[in-house]
Image: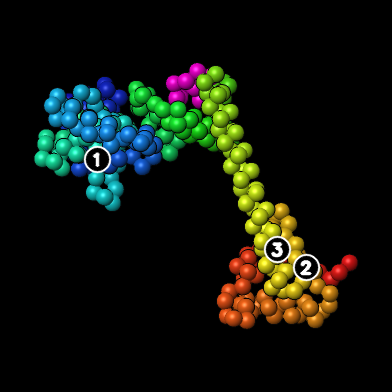
Amino acid sequence: MSSLLDLMSGGVKFEKIRVTDIRPNPRNFYGETEDEEEYIDTMAQLISENGQESNGVVFEQSGDDGRHYTLLSGERRWKAITKNLEEGKGDGLMDVKIVSKPEDDADEYLRLIRNNAQRNKSKQIREKEVEIVLGIYNQLAEQGQRPVGKKREWIGAQVGLSPRQVQSYLKALESAQEGQEKLEDEHTALESQRLTESLTALTGHKTKITKSFAVTIRCHSLEDIQSLKELLEKGVNPNGTVSTMSETSDRDHTSQDPE
C-alpha cells in the first residue's frame, strides 16, 4: 500500500522528522541576511504558539554527521524548531515533504531557488540567484546542452523574474566583474613591478617580468650566468632567509646574453 501511494505521489512523502536528523543545505545562500536572527526568533515564537504552518522540503542523504536528510527549503523553520528544542519548547519534530535527491549540483541549486520562490527577497539575493543560474546556463552551453530560447528568458523562468529584470541584473553583474578584473590587473601590475625591482636588486642584473609571468634576467657574460645559476640553486640570501627569487621559482626563468 505504501509503495502504491509513493508511486501515485511521484515518490513524494510527507513526514514528521526530528530536526536533529536534518542538516541545513551547505549550498543555501538565502540565510545570508543581516536580520536573519531576528527572523528566527520571531518564527520560533510563532511556531511555539501556533505550530508549524507549512512544510519544509528535504531529500534523503546520509553523511558522516549521522543525519539522514538535507534541506531544500525551510531552513528558518528548521532553525526555529531547533531553537525551541534547545530551550525545552516543543518536541523537535519538523513537518517536511521528502522529495527525490537532486541529480547534480546544478539541479540542487535550481531546486533550492524554486523551493524558495515564496520568500521576500532583497536585491542582493535576487542578484545571487541570477548569478548562480547564469553559471548553470553557461555550464550547460559548454556541455552542448544550451537551453532553448534566449538566455535572459531561460534565467527568468528559473528565478521568477521578467527578461527585462534579468537583463538589469546581468548588466550589474558584468559591471561588477569588470571592476573586479580591473582591480586584479592593477594588483598584478604593482606586484610585478615590486618583484622586478627585488629581482634586479638581488641578482644585480636587469630583470623583466612579462604579462604571462615569464622572467628574463639579462646577463653580460658566461660568468654572470654561472653566478646567477649558483644563486638560483642556493635559493637564499646571504643572511639565510629565503630570497624573492626562490619565492617565484614556479615561474619561467630565462637568462639571455645582450643582443
Q: Is residue 140 above or below residue 192?
A: above
- Residue for point 24% across, 49% down: 66
Is 100 covered by the magenta stretch?
no
Q: Can you identify the residue that label 3 sits on?
A: 196
Hey, what amino acid is under mark 3? Thr
For the residues carrying marks 3 and 1, which lies nearer the camera in this image?
3
Q: How is the image coloured?
A: rainbow
Nearer to us in this view, 45 or 232: 45
For the magenta stretch, what is the residue range? Answer: 154-163
Q: Is residue 90 above or below residue 62?
A: above
Q: Could you tell me which secondary element the residue under label 2 belongs to?
A: loop
Q: Position of residue 214 (x, y in %)?
A: 71, 60
Mark 2 or mark 1, earlier in chain: 1
Is residue 96 among what the camera can see? no
Tell me: 10 left or right of 170: left
Q: Position of residue 246 (x, y in %)?
A: 62, 71
Q: Can you identify the residue that label 2 sits on?
A: 206
- Residue for point 45% across, 24% down: 158
Label the magenta part by its dominant secondary structure.
helix
Q: Is residue 53 above or below residue 246?
A: above
Q: Residues within 10 Å of mark 2 (few under 14, many from 20)?
A: some
Nearer to us in this view, 66 or 134: 134
Hey, what amino acid is under mark 2? Lys
Q: Can you identify the residue that label 1 sits on?
A: 22
Q: Residues within 10 Å of mark 3 (few under 14, many from 20)?
A: many
Distance of label 2 from label 1 (alpha carbons): 62 Å
